[in-house]
Image (spheres, helix red, strand yellow):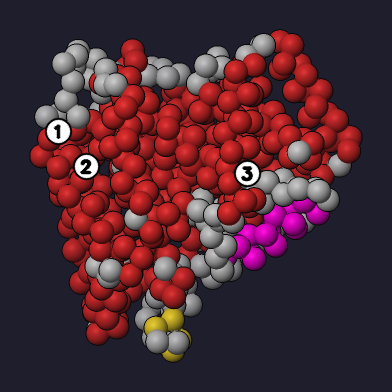
């Protein structure tokens, strides 16, 4: 028990301090995200690992905790997080709820290398590596991904319920989704998909809010940085959605306010530094740091010149261009790979409609939910966001031929993408991306609940 508390406080202390500085002490559910943001930087700045794996480093963190304890005196914050993490750890210790997957070994290897002050070039995000860094001779914190994911899920849900003035009991509306076996398996893995999904949901919610009801923009940009750091694929799959969100979020900012654009540039560039080693290793297309840099530069240029006629035109019709891009990608894939592309699409669709592990239930749940959100929304921007989410689902399917480095255990020997795949379908990366998308919009299903007090709608 002492080792568990020791490791928990070691992990939580940076988040507690950041929450104090940002004055979010009462936002208990965000504290753990601030912690993982800090510790993820240790995958790049290796010396930060001294704070984790040495006595004097631990002692320094302990002094920081003592300072926070005496300076901010927000004891409910640390108590909530310790209790929540304790519950998850006790359940896992008693019943073994975690789902250990094939990528666990390479992530653990990368974590051990980082703790040994070695730069790891394994293609896994820094956030995922951080999940496995907190252990000693007596104990291993194993449920950090679930702790982070569920904390943000509750935070997102409460945020919606508060602004819609809906009783907290309606939080039960989203519970059925966690009875689907494939969803349970995903959230119980030591991966970053669940956590990443809730960060995206957080960004969408903050964008949908009226400006006066939003949290500090510093918090928003920290979470934007976390989102781009949490999965290497996020640069690719959610690029159009990020253009929508960020253009809307900065919509009312004064053009002369250069600080907001500097914050945006920092929030979108720092993830490249945090994941520098992962983005520089191997033949994986996600590991091409040049593409990541180019995408970030284009994103910032688009937002900075958002008021220009061309950018306004692109923003207004972004979903049309997105749909045309997906159609063009489908045509290109078929030209390059012929029936291999067709087989890839059929395989993925068959998988998503399979009764095995409840995939068909999750797929229908997602489709019905997104269709209902599109039809229910009475604001143009909300409709744009939900249509974009649906198109992202289509992108996940259409892009599958580019992700199949192996088909039927035969190495693809032709095509311009040869040897640069980001997906081997035997490890179900595409279906995990779908579940991430599904979990991203799940808390937003609460907006369909009507309230008698709608004067503060999101």
- From mark 2 to mark 1, how far is it between C-alphas? 9 Å
Tell me if residue 279 can be seen.
no
Residue nearest the observer in this picture, 370 or 89:
89
Which segment is the magenta one?
Answer: 103-117
Query: Could you tell whether 51 is left or right of 226 in the image?
Result: right
Tell me which residue sits at (51%, 67%) in the image: 284
- Say which mark, if any, is on residue 90: 3
Q: Secondary structure at mark 1?
A: loop
Tell me which residue sits at (18%, 63%) in the image: 327
Q: Quadrant of the N terminus?
A: top right
Tell me which residue sits at (82%, 44%) in the image: 53
Mark sitting earlier along the chain (1/3): 3
Mark sitting earlier along the chain (2/3): 3
Residue 381 appears in which quarter of the rendering?
top left
CB within 8 Å, label 2 to label 3:
no
Residue of label 1: 377
Q: Is residue 378 above or below residue 353?
A: above
- Say which mark, if any, is on residue 286: none
Q: Is residue 189 above or below residue 34?
A: below
Query: Could you tell whether 312 is left or right of 98 in the image?
Result: left
Q: Residues within 10 Å of mark 3 (few under 14, many from 20)?
A: few
Tell me if residue 187 can be seen.
yes
Q: Is residue 71 above or below residue 230?
A: above
Classified by dominant secondary structure, the portion drawn in magenta counts as helix
């Amino acid at each position: 028990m002492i080792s568990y508390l020791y490791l928990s406080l070691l992990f939580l202390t940076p988040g507690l301090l950041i929450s104090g500085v940002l004055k979010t002490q009462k936002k208990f559910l965000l504290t753990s995200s601030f912690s993982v943001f800090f510790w993820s930087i240790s995958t790049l700045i290796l010396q930060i690992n001294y704070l984790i794996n040495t006595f004097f480093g631990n002692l320094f963190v302990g002094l920081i905790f003592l300072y926070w304890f005496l300076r901010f005196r927000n004891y409910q914050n640390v108590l909530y997080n310790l209790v929540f993490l304790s519950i998850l750890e006790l359940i896992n210790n008693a019943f073994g709820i975690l789902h250990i997957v094939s990528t666990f070994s390479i992530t653990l290897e990368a974590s051990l290398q980082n703790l040994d002050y070695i730069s790891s070039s394994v293609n896994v995000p820094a956030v995922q590596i951080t999940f496995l860094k907190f252990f000693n001779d007596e104990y291993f914190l194993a449920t950090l991904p679930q702790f982070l994911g569920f904390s943000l899920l509750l935070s997102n849900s409460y945020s919606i319920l508060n602004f819609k003035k809906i009783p907290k009991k309606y939080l039960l509306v989203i519970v059925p989704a966690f009875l689907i076996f494939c969803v349970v398996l995903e959230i119980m893995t030591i991966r970053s998909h669940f956590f990443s999904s809730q960060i995206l949901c957080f960004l969408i919610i903050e964008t949908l809010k009226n400006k006066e009801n939003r949290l500090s923009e510093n918090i928003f940009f920290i979470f934007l940085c976390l989102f781009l750091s949490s999965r290497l694929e996020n640069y690719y799959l959610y690029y159009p959605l990020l253009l929508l969100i960020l253009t809307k979020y900065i919509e009312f900012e004064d053009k002369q306010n250069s600080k907001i654009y500097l914050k945006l540039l920092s929030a979108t560039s720092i993830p490249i530094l945090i994941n520098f080693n992962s983005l520089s290793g191997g033949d994986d297309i996600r590991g091409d740091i040049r593409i990541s840099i180019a995408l970030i530069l284009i994103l910032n240029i688009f937002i900075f010149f958002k008021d220009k006629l061309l950018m306004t035109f692109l923003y207004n019709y972004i979903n049309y261009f997105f749909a045309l891009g997906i159609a063009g990608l489908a045509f290109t894939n078929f030209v390059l790979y012929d029936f291999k592309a067709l087989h890839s699409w059929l395989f993925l669709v068959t998988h998503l409609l399979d009764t095995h592990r409840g995939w068909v239930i999750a797929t229908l749940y997602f489709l019905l939910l997104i269709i209902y959100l599109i039809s229910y929304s009475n604001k143009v921007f909300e409709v744009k966001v939900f249509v974009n989410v649906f198109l992202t689902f289509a992108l996940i399917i259409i892009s599958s031929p580019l992700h199949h480095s192996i088909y039927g255990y035969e190495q693809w020997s032709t095509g311009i993408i040869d040897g640069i795949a980001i997906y081997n379908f035997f490890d179900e990366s595409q279906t995990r991306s779908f579940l991430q998308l599904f979990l991203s919009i799940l808390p937003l299903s609460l907006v369909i609940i009507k309230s008698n007090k709608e004067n503060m709608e999101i």
